[in-house]
Image: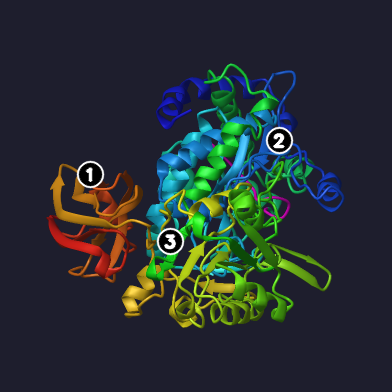
């Protein structure tokens, strides 16, 4: 269901929801606001079965009035419920810079949610990557609000085609994991509006039916209770029609504050709502009108989605992890790995010339698809890097493996190989949703942006022995590589590439697929160039700058820039033009594939604010388009952005204001100055 349909149906379903409310008791209305997933059941699923959300988590519903239950399935790299297709993590999909591809991912997820018995997908994660160390960085799309908003809107459109309610999370300012339950985020109104809210608004404009509040505090108050954010901004200013759920178990800390603050459903169990909320109404601490508003939002949204005609005649189990869906998982992995270095055209490898391939590193045989927390998908199988390379080469080459622990044996293997693939990086124990069992901790915020010392030593030792050493990085966000990047000829960031990751990796390394991913974050040369990060912080302050905007503001060159990624072919961008038409700025250029292979380029449009009278970034991304071209082919590319997206938020007037001035405009293949063509346009205030 798209946003236009939702708006058309809103009035009709509002009246129907009111009719239902007139028939309901206070307890029945409050029952709609309460999750059913018992803590004992949840604990059993996690500790015994190792499978949180193995079946949909239910909430609300009313049998006699035939109001359907909410049936929640988590994400975002696929459907957590049951055994479903596992896509690459969202950060890797962000690297595709391909909104059409992401909408196709959403389409598959919507089908599989329905096939698993759900009607609600809790996996549209658009937490902004302020800190690359953030444990759940892998669950979002990147560091830039514009880019994150476009990708989040795309998956939302895809999911909701199948009348599955898409939930966007975690609202808002959720950027670190270890202290997520208590960290208090401070930022001024301008920072909030310009940096940490636009991507949420973009997803809601795409029609998302639900929002999940975050655990953290904002200005001293938990966001599950925060009436400024949930009522004033979300529901009043933005006109959000759907309902707000709490993050699970610890998302509410006070019955009265949460209900009055605008939190519509307590998930996943009933602790603070239920009888406690009914008692609060009876003693006058919560008005019954508050309950009526929440119940109306829940009923209206459920009816709008469940009564809309489905695009398919049925959603049988045969859809789950079917061949078509698995094929898409591999395509996404292939289109989103990022080639960072390729000296002397080391890649692609030539199959006929590789008779001995050494695959090295403890992660090479690891089924490493990402975090083991609430985003963990359970696919029917996983292709590891080693397995993918072995399947690709078959009997044509000897593929040897070493985990790297026996250095002498590993060096001997590498020295005799025609090429070495070194797989290094992280697992769920290094980064992910924070969990602790007594003194043992795993997941959570990353302790370092470097590789483990053992990985660095392995790279340095092996690279000295074999000139065709290819480093394949595994991880959810930026990995710093200053101490070793100059010693190897090729570096590929593979992220956590999903169930078909090993096959995708083989296809890229051997040139069956031309890499086209671009970094959705900045990789610095020095961690001091990033915002300061403390894994144990209980209070933090955010400013306007992080990622590429911070490095550019302070004059620091990145190791690898936002939007950067190499190809096996060459592209030329020419004849850049920028003009204003009606309410939009239009950037155009020609893109030519001047190389010998078919490939795809991501054309990026940035707007600069050099003449601004207020403190603003040097430039901001305001559009992108992925273009696939045959060798010698040229295409005209046009990218538009609304003029309103160039406004700044004035906290004194509490308005978005447009500066009348000359704006810089850039179009090119990354955020680096040398990769951009420059122009300008003028706007009146």
Q: Which residue is mark 3?
A: 519
Q: Earlier in the sequence, mark 3 or mark 1?
A: 3
Secondary element under disc 1, as helix, strand or loop, is: strand
Secondary element under disc 2, as helix, strand or loop, is: helix
- Position of 132 with respect to 362 (left or right) is left
Q: How many C-alpha atoms fall within 10 Å of the one at disc 1: few (<14), some, or many (≥20)?
A: some
| Residue 288: image location, x then y, percent | 64, 36
Towards the viewer: 252 or 96: 96
Q: How many C-alpha atoms fall within 10 Å of the one at disc 2: few (<14), some, or many (≥20)?
A: many
- Residue 291's quadrant in the figure? top right
Instruction: Determine if residue 293 is in view.
Output: no
- Residue 628's quadrant in the figure? top left
Q: Give the spatial CA distance, label 2 vs label 3.
A: 45 Å
| Residue 539: image location, x then y, percent | 58, 73
Q: Which residue is mark 1?
A: 635
Q: Residue at x 73, y 35 (%)?
A: 58
The mark closer to the camera, 2 or 1, is: 1
Q: How many C-alpha atoms fall within 10 Å of the one at disc 3: few (<14), some, or many (≥20)?
A: many
Location of residue 241 with respect to 656 vertically, above or below: above
Q: Earlier in the sequence, mark 2 or mark 3?
A: 2
């Amino acid at each position: 269901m798209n946003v236009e349909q939702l708006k058309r149906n809103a009035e009709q379903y509002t009246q129907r929801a009111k009719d239902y409310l007139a028939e309901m008791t206070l307890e029945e209305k409050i029952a709609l606001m309460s999750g059913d997933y018992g803590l004992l059941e949840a604990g059993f699923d996690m500790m015994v079965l190792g499978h949180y959300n193995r079946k949909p988590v239910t909430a609300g519903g009313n049998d006699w009035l035939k109001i359907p239950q909410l049936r929640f399935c988590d994400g975002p790299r696929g459907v957590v419920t049951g055994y479903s297709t596992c896509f690459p993590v969202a950060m890797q999909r962000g690297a595709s810079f391909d909104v059409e591809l992401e909408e196709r991912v959403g389409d598959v997820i919507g089908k599989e949610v329905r096939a698993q018995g759900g009607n609600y997908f809790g996996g549209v994660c658009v937490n902004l990557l302020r800190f690359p160390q953030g444990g759940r960085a892998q669950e979002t799309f990147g560091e830039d609000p514009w880019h994150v908003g476009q990708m989040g809107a795309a998956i939302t459109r895809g999911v909701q085609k199948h009348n599955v309610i898409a939930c966007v999370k975690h609202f808002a300012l959720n950027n670190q994991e270890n202290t997520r339950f208590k960290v208090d985020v401070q930022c001024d109104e301008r920072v909030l509006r310009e940096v940490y809210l636009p991507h949420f608004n973009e997803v809601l404009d795409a029609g998302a039916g639900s929002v999940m509040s975050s655990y953290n505090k904002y200005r001293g108050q938990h966001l599950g209770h925060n009436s400024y954010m949930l009522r004033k901004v979300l529901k009043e200013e933005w006109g959000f029609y759907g309902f707000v759920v709490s993050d699970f178990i610890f998302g509410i800390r006070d019955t009265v504050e949460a209900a009055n603050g605008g939190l519509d459903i307590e998930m996943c169990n009933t602790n603070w709502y239920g009888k406690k909320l009914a008692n609060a109404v009876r003693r006058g601490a919560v008005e019954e009108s508050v309950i009526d508003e929440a119940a109306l939002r829940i009923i209206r949204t459920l009816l709008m989605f469940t009564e809309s005609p489905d695009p398919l005649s049925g959603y049988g189990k045969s859809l789950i992890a079917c061949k078509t869906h698995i094929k898409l998982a591999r395509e996404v992995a292939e289109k989103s790995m990022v080639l960072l270095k390729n000296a002397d055209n080391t890649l692609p490898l030539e199959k006929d010339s590789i008779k001995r391939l050494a695959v090295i590193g403890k992660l090479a045989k690891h089924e490493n698809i990402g975090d083991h927390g609430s985003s963990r998908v359970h696919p029917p199988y996983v292709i590891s890097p080693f397995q993918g390379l072995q399947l690709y080469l078959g009997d044509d080459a000897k593929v040897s493996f070493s985990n790297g622990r026996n250095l002498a044996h590993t060096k001997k293997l590498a020295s005799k190989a025609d090429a070495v693939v070194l797989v290094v990086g992280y697992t769920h124990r290094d980064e992910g949703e924070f969990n602790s069992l007594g003194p043992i901790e795993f997941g959570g915020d990353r302790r370092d942006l470097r590789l483990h010392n053992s990985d660095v030593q392995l790279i340095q030792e092996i690279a000295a022995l074999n000139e065709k050493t290819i480093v394949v990085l595994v991880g959810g966000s930026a990995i710093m590589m200053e101490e070793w990047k100059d010693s190897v000829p090729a570096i590929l960031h593979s992220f956590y590439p999903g169930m078909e990751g090993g096959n995708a990796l083989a296809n890229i390394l051997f040139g069956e697929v031309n890499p086209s991913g671009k970094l959705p974050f900045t990789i610095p040369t020095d961690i001091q160039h990033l915002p300061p990060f403390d894994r144990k912080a209980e209070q933090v302050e955010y400013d306007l700058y992080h990622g590429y905007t911070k490095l550019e503001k302070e004059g620091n060159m990145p190791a690898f820039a936002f939007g950067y990624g190499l190809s096996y072919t060459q592209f030329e961008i020419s004849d850049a033009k920028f003009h204003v038409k009606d309410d939009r700025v239009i950037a155009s250029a020609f893109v030519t594939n001047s190389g010998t292979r078919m490939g795809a380029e991501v054309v990026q449009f940035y707007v600069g604010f050099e003449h601004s009278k207020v403190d603003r970034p040097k430039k901001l991304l305001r559009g992108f388009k992925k273009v696939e071209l045959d060798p010698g082919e040229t295409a005209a590319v046009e990218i538009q952005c609304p003029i309103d997206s160039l406004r700044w938020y004035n906290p004194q007037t509490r308005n978005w204001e447009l500066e009348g001035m000359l704006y810089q405009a850039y179009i090119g293949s990354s955020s680096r100055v040398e990769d951009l063509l420059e122009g300008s346009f003028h706007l009146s205030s």
